[in-house]
Structures are given as C-alpha cells and as structure tokens.
Image (cartoon, grey):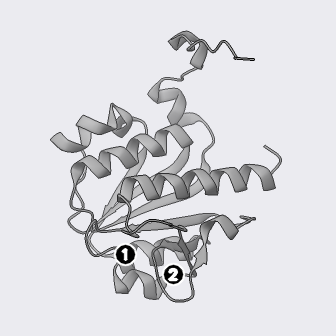
Amino acid sequence: MMQDFVKKEMAELERVDADAFKGQEKFPLVLVLDQLRSGLNVGSFFRTADAMGIEAVYCIGYTPTPPHREILKTALGSTESVNWKHYDSISDSLSDLKARGYRIIGLEQVHGSTFMDEVIEITEPTALVVGNEVSGVSEEAIGLCDACWEIRQFGTKHSMNVAVSGGMAIHHWVHLWRKGNGA
C-alpha cells in the first residue's frame, strides 16, 4: 500500500524569526571550523547550525567569516541567527572551550578514533572540530582533542565533503543529547 505524502506548507514548519531563535535555548554544541578554505562550506555549516539549534560556530584562522559572498550564498540568512566568533588560532579557541567545560571532539580519521555510529551517549557540552577540505583537522587541534570520531565508510575514496560529514556528526550529537536528556 502506498502512502500519500504531501509536502508541508511553509506555515506548517513553525519557523521562528532570527530574534526568537537567538533567544531560544540552544544545544551545548560549538562547531569549530579549523582552517576551512571554502566560504560555501562555511555557509553550509551556518545553515546546519541554525537548523539543528546549536550554540555557536567558531571560525579559525583563515576560515572565511560573514559577511562573505560565498557564505551568504549557502547560509540563506543563518549568519544573522547563529552566534559565531573568529579566533586566530585553534589553541586559543579550544583552550577557551575547555576552560568552559566543553569536551573537544575532532572529526577525523586517526588511530584511536571511535566510529561515530558506535557512540551511544553524550553527557557533556561539546566542541566539534572539523578540518580543512584538503588536509583535515590540524595536528595541533588533534593534539588538543579529548576524543576523535570517524565516520564509517564503505567506498573507494574514504573522503567526504566537510560540510556533509560535519552535518552528519552534528545530527548524531544532537540526537544523542536529546535522547539522554529526555527531549
């Protein structure tokens, strides 16, 4: 038996405006963009951060920041709703987050990583570090991480677009946080 699916109208999506979004409680997840090159990827992260209701986006080093033509193209206005900061160095940003009680998780293929699909519980505010489109999360950032997540892959490339893999990790983290906190 086929289901008759009908797209929801915009009014049914219960969207809030940027001011209401800024005032609502956020999930305690900070996305740290470690030396990204592409403003399009940065804009995608802003849009994902808005959609998932996470706390903030930190842009590190030469990562483009708003307003930037490529960011605005993919962010679709989310740079107005999502809190963000720029740091010159990854160590400064992660030190600040650690001092605030955040657990630092790198999304990278490293020895000792945990496959993301094996992570079944989140109990602490978290900073998720994603890396450069070519070289990944920097060695400096990896050295400051409390853990690293790896996305299990089955193809020939073992490489994914940073905004896609980051979106997967953000969604997984929010799902686990909501599950563990009764949401």
Residue type (three-letter) at the residue carrying disc 1: Val
Q: Secondary structure at mark 2?
A: loop
Q: Left or right: where does residue 161 sit relative to residue 115?
A: left
For the residues labelled 2 and 1, the Cα–Cα distance comes to 10 Å
Tell me the residue at 83%/47% (across/down): 182
Indicate which label's residue lies in the foreground, 2 or 1.
1
Front-most of 31 and 135?
A: 135
On the rendered structure, is 150 left or right of 164? Answer: right
Picture mark count = 2
With respect to residue 110, does 162 lie above or below? Answer: above
Return the mark for residue 118. none
Q: Position of residue 119 (x, y in %)?
A: 69, 68
Labels 2 & 1 near each other (Cβ < 8 A): yes
Identify the residue position indicated by label 1 in the image.
137
Residue bearing the label numbered 2: 145
Q: Earlier in the sequence, mark 2 or mark 1?
A: 1
Residue at 33%, 38% in the rendered image: 75
Height in image: 105 above or below 33? below
Q: Quadrant of the C terminus?
A: top right
Q: Horizontal and vertical percent for residue 110?
A: 47, 84
Task: Tell me where residue 165 appears, x and y as whole percent.
Answer: 45, 58
